[in-house]
Image (cartoon, grey):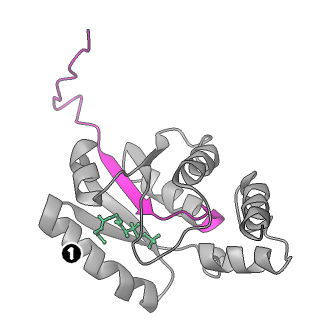
Amino acid sequence: MTQTRVPTQDNPPTRVAVCPGSFDPITNGHVDVVRRALTMFDEVVVAVATNAAKAPLLSPQSRVDLAAGAVAGLPGARAELVPGLLADFLRQVGACAVVKGVRGASDVDAEVPMALVNRHLAGVETVFVAADQSLTHIASSIVKDVARHGGNIDDLVPAGVAAAVYEALSEDHL
Ligand code: PNS
């Protein structure tokens, strides 16, 4: 039988935040955002979703598995697949906030419309966190481009991710 945890003043409700993205693949920049989110929320769900404007290299399950491995050492963090609309997922996991990392003005321009639609549909606010200055050059698209041209991406992504990217790229060329 599942026990319901009744929130009280001494036992406040668990605050769940969602870090959504394509995570194709997850990078050290994403993990930094999850770490920052964990300083503000009890649980952080890395939510692997579909961006209709992008054609991903990795399968949804592979992106979830790599994200799960990347946050395995962070208590309170987990990775899940978003099967459809992010707003539905936010309600499903009882999220009180979305957390997104921003590296600069172009990220803010892209993120604000998504924040507004998620607030409109689910009533959930988005918290923007400034990316670590040492990681602002990292983006999944750049990681894939470096790897596609034979460059080393080991310092840009969590352990195990580089191998999965190289493997997917080799299959992509078949
Ligand atoms: O890492 P990205 O590609 O910038 O992340 C964008 C993503 C995947 C979070 C966004 O496209 C999304 O929320 N997709 C799920 C479908 C959805 O809810 N669309 C409406 C909000 S944009």
Where does the image place residue 51, in percent across and percent down from the top left? Answer: 41, 70
Q: Nearer the viewer, residue 117 or 148?
A: 148
Q: Is residue 139 visible?
A: no
Q: How many marks?
A: 1
User: Which residue shows up at 75% across the image and 62% down it?
Assistant: 171
Q: Is residue 160 visible?
A: yes
> With respect to residue 28, does 18 lie above or below?
above
Q: In the drawing, does residue 109 fall left or right of residue 88?
A: right
Check disc 1 and report its element: helix, strand or loop: helix
| Residue labelled 1 has its Cβ within 8 Å of some atom of ligand 1 | no
Q: The N terminus lies in which quarter of the figure? A: top left
> With respect to residue 68, does 153 lie above or below?
below
Residue 10 occupies quadrant: top left
Where does the image place residue 147, in percent across and percent down from the top left? Answer: 78, 73
Kind of residue at badge 1: Leu
User: Which residue shows up at 63% across the image and 50% down it?
Assistant: 66
Q: Residues within 10 Å of mark 1 (few under 14, many from 20)?
A: some
Residue 12 occupies quadrant: top left
Q: Is 26 a magenta residue?
A: yes
Q: The C terminus lies in which quarter of the figure? A: bottom right
Q: Nearer the viewer, residue 62 or 34?
A: 62
User: Which residue shows up at 42% across the image and 78% down it?
Assistant: 53
Q: In the drawing, does residue 1 fall left or right of residue 108?
A: left
Where does the image place residue 106, in percent across and percent down from the top left? Answer: 44, 90
Q: Nearer the viewer, residue 59 or 34?
A: 59
Quadrant of the rendered image holding ligand 1: bottom left
Q: In the drawing, does residue 62 fall left or right of residue 125?
A: right
Predominant SS along the magenta part? loop
> With respect to residue 14, does 97 lie above or below?
below
Highlighted range, magenta: 1-29
User: Which residue shows up at 60% across the image and 61% down it?
Assistant: 26
Residue on which the image places disc 1: 116
